[in-house]
Amino acid sequence: MVSSIAIKQIKKILKCQDTDATEIDLILVVTTLSTITITSGAAVFSRYESWSYFDSVYYCVITLTTIGFGDMVALQKDHALDQKPEYVAFALIFILFGMAIVAASLNLFVLRFVTMNTEDERRDEAEALQAAAGAVRLEGDVITANGSILSGQCPQEGASFTDLTSVCSCTCASCAPCHALPFTRSYSFRKRSMNLSYILPRRQRLQQQREQQQQQREMQQREHLQREREQQQVTHTDTQEELCSSSSESDVTPTLAQKRNSV
C-alpha cells in the first residue's frame, strides 16, 4: 500500500498521464527493497558474526524466504543475547520486516505469472472469435469479405459499401455485383459451394452429400414414372387405332372383341 501511494505521487510529480501503480511498478519497487534489505542485512551480520559477505547473503536469503536450513544461526557467539541488545533488536526487526518484503515480492511475481496466463487465454479467445467472425460463408453464390451474401442480385438502397466489398482481387468491370451502383470498385465473384465443400465441417459435408443423393434419387424416380406414363399412353393409342380399324369390317375376331370390351 505504501509503495502504491509512493508510486502515484512520483508519477504525479513527473506529470505522467497514467498515475496508477501497475503490477510491474510494484514488482520493481518490492524487488529493489528486497535487494536493499538483503544486502544491508548481510553487511551487518558479516560484521557481528565474523562471516564472509557471501555467507551472510546466504543466511539472509534462507532466513527471509523461510527455508531455514539451520546450518548458519545468528546470535550464537560471544553471548550476543546478553551483551549486545542492539544487535538482537536489529535481528528481530530485520527478520520481521525482511520476511514481509520478500513475501510481498514473491506474491507479486506469482500474481504476475497468473495474470500473464489469463491474458494469453483471453487473447486466444479473442483471436478465435475474430477468426470465426471473418470466416468465409459458402451458402450463397457471391462470397464477400465480411461474410455477407449477394446471391447474384443487385443490393437494396440501404446496403452499405462495406457490405459489398468482396474478396476478389481482380479489377475487371465484370466482377462488379451491380453495374447500376454509383461506385465502381465493389468487386465480387461467383463460386459454387460444392467446389469449396472441403472447407466445411464433416457433419455439414455429409449432410450436403445426403441431400444431393436424395435429390438425384427423386429425379430418377420422376424420370422413371414419366417413361412408364408415356409407354402406357402409346399402348392405349395403338389399341384404340386397332379397334377403330376393325370396326369397319363385318367379321370381328374374338381377340378384337375382347380388346374392345376391355377398352
Image (cartoon, rainbow, N blue to C red):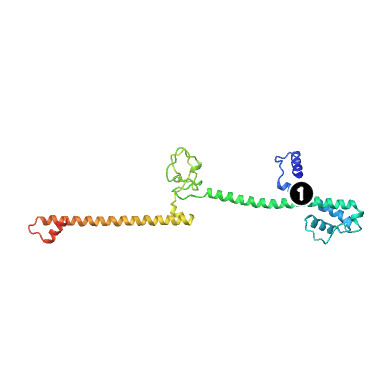
Image quadrant occupied by the N terminus: top right
Residue drawn at (14%, 59%), measured in percent from left and top? 258
Q: Quick one: which residue is furthest to the front in this view?
A: 82
Viewer-proximal residue, 10 or 183? Answer: 10
Residue drawn at (12%, 56%), measured in percent from left and top? 245
Asked whether, in this view, residue 213 is left or right of residue 108, the answer is: left
Q: Tell me where residue 153 appears, x and y as whole percent.
A: 42, 43
Asked whether, in this view, residue 245 is left or right of residue 54, the answer is: left
Asked whether, in this view, residue 158 is left or right of residue 35, the answer is: left
Image quadrant occupied by the C terminus: bottom left
As shown in the figure, which amino acid type bears the numbered disc 1?
Val
Viewer-proximal residue, 257 or 93? Answer: 93
Q: Tell me where residue 156 appears, x and y as whole percent.
A: 44, 39
Seen in the picture, residue 99 relative to 255 is either above or below; the reply is: above
Seen in the picture, residue 47 relative to 21 is either above or below; the reply is: below
Question: According to the image, label 1 marks what residue?
Answer: 30
Seen in the picture, residue 150 relative to 41 is either above or below; the reply is: above
Q: Is residue 242 visible?
A: no
Viewer-proximal residue, 70 or 165? Answer: 70
